[in-house]
């Protein structure tokens, strides 16, 4: 066990160093992977056995990689079609200055549910609203907390979220059933969060709303109602429980048609945007934040998932963490599975610096505990979403929290105001007392 602890320590130190020095966490993940491969060899496993374990681990994440490809295409085509610009424009136009913080949270929730990504949300609508907040003399930490909390709403329960799809895969559950359970279990936290942000809004109104963003959007895009069609397709497909990959493909196709027919995009440009990301080719604030997306933007997230899946394969194949599994199982009998899952989620999120490995490790460590107590696989699925997924946003060096903060030019001060992220884990256990709480099929 000492050798395992040593490799974990080296891995963690490398992760923290790279996060604070803006080095891709792919580098320490590879260092850690080599360390665990060497440890497996020391335990008598051949390279063939090790690569087989890694391949089995990676195989479980295949659908997540497919989702990444589709997300890359959606983030590019929705930009080119004017869909994201339309959401930003009307979000700003209908926002009430008195309830700016509440609106910021709600709008962030909506955009994150549609996009399925926390990073894409704060990088678009989040940046715009932060500019408005700073110009209006508001508490930047408070606004950033509301925005990032809302961004994690969709990151947790959007059908297009890689996190939601990953949890469904590792727990062998159905995505849309999990989403129903997540929405239901998150209801108390959502209501409390809305109430808190309403109170904050009364005491922290936006004092000024002067911004050239709306005018710039009108110059760059035709934002007629048709621009919202790609989002309607995603929402409609979710209501009808259509396979998320089919829904995303239909939305991408619709957005591509709108980009060509409505926004006047050339076919060659659309192909280029789909690969390397959208850009307007003009100067301006909104032109700067709307650029991005595309398949290349998904390369690093895909590598993180691949390497993290390889870790999970090694841990499962070698039984390297069996002592930890036994310890968690005993603790779960005394303290309850939800409390131990929450604590494990905190530790793994702090240790791994990314959501993917945190989810995989928490699931592996706690799976025996749920099975021994006769609890459903849907129970562990929703527990992972209510703990490991959102807790990652509260770890300063975890990429899930560090990137959104950096995108909004914020430090760690936002965390105390990201109330949904810590109210949800606290209220999650309450829902099990309600009849009909957990749907299993």
Image: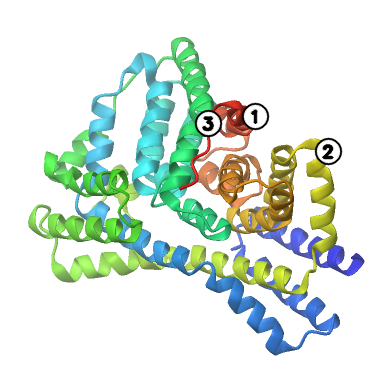
Q: Is residue 82 visible?
A: yes
Residue placed most toward the observer, 212 or 112: 112
The first of marks 1 and 3 along the sequence is 3
Task: Tell me where residue 428 appears, x and y as whole percent.
Answer: 60, 32
The image shows residue 352, relative to residue 408, as above or below, that is below
How far apart in space, not on screen, are marks 1 and 3 (Cα)?
Answer: 18 Å
Residue of label 3: 145
Q: Nearer the viewer, mark 1 or mark 2?
A: 2
Q: Which mark is residue 94?
A: none
Q: Secondary structure at mark 1?
A: helix
Give the farthest residue toward the left.
261
Q: Which mark is residue 426?
A: 1
Q: Are marks 1 and 3 in contact (CB under 8 Å)?
A: no
Q: Secondary structure at mark 2?
A: helix
Task: Tell me where residue 373 appears, x and y as whole percent.
Answer: 72, 46
Picture quarter with the N terminus: bottom right
| Horizontal relation, residue 126 to residue 346: left or right | left
Task: Tell me where residue 163 appears, x and y as whole percent.
Answer: 50, 52
Pointer 1 local density, CA inside 10 Å: few below 14, some 14–19, many at least 20: some
Give the farthest residue toward the top.
202
Residue of label 2: 334
| Horizontal relation, residue 349 to residue 209: left or right | right
How far apart in space, not on screen, are marks 2 and 3 (Cα)?
Answer: 35 Å
The image shows residue 58, relative to residue 111, as above or below, that is below
The residue sitting at 62% across, 65% down in the picture is 308
Q: Secondary structure at mark 3?
A: helix
Residue 18, image quadrant: bottom right
Q: Is residue 292 visible?
A: no
The residue sitting at 22% across, 44% down in the picture is 232
Task: Tell me where residue 397 appears, x and y as whole percent.
Answer: 66, 48
């Amino acid at each position: 066990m000492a050798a395992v602890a040593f490799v974990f320590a080296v891995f963690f130190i490398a992760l923290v160093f790279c996060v604070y020095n803006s080095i891709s966490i792919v580098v320490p993940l590879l260092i850690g992977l080599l360390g665990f491969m060497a440890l497996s060899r020391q335990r008598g496993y051949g390279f063939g056995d090790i690569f087989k374990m890694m391949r089995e681990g990676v195989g479980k994440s295949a659908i997540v990689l497919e989702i990444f490809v589709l997300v890359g295409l959606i983030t590019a085509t929705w930009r080119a079609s004017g869909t994201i610009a339309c959401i930003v424009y009307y979000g700003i136009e209908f926002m009430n200055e008195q309830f700016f913080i509440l609106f910021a949270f709600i709008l962030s929730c909506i955009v994150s549910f549609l996009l399925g990504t926390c990073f894409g949300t704060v990088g678009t609508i989040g940046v715009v609203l932060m500019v408005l907040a700073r110009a209006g003399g508001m508490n930047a930490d408070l606004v950033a907390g509301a925005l990032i909390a809302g961004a994690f709403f969709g990151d947790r329960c959007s059908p297009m979220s890689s996190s939601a799809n990953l949890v469904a895969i590792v727990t062998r559950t159905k995505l849309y059933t999990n989403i129903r359970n997540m929405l239901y279990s998150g209801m108390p936290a959502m209501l409390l969060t809305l109430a808190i942000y309403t109170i904050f809004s009364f005491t922290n109104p936006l004092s000024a709303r002067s911004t050239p963003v709306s005018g710039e959007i009108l110059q760059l895009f035709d934002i007629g109602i048709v621009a919202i069609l790609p989002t309607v397709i995603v929402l409609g497909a979710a209501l009808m429980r259509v396979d998320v990959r089919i829904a995303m493909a239909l939305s991408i196709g619709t957005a591509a048609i709108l980009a060509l027919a409505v926004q006047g995009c050339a076919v060659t440009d659309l192909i280029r945007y789909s690969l390397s990301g959208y850009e307007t080719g003009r100067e301006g604030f909104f032109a700067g934040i709307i650029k991005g997306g595309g398949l290349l933007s998904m390369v690093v997230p895909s590598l993180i998932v691949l390497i993290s899946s390889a870790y999970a394969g090694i841990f499962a194949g070698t039984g390297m963490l069996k002592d930890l599994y036994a310890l968690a199982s005993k603790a779960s009998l005394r303290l309850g599975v939800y409390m131990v899952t929450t604590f494990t989620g905190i530790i793994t999120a702090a240790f791994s610096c990314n959501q993917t490995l945190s989810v995989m490790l928490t699931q592996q460590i706690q799976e025996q505990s749920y099975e021994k107590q006769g609890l459903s696989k849907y129970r562990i699925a929703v527990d992972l979403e209510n703990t490991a997924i959102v807790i990652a946003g509260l770890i300063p060096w975890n990429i899930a929290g560090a990137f959104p903060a950096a995108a909004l030019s914020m430090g760690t001060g936002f965390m105390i105001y990201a109330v949904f992220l810590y109210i949800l884990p606290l209220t999650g256990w309450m829902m099990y007392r309600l009849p009909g709480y957990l749907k299993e099929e």
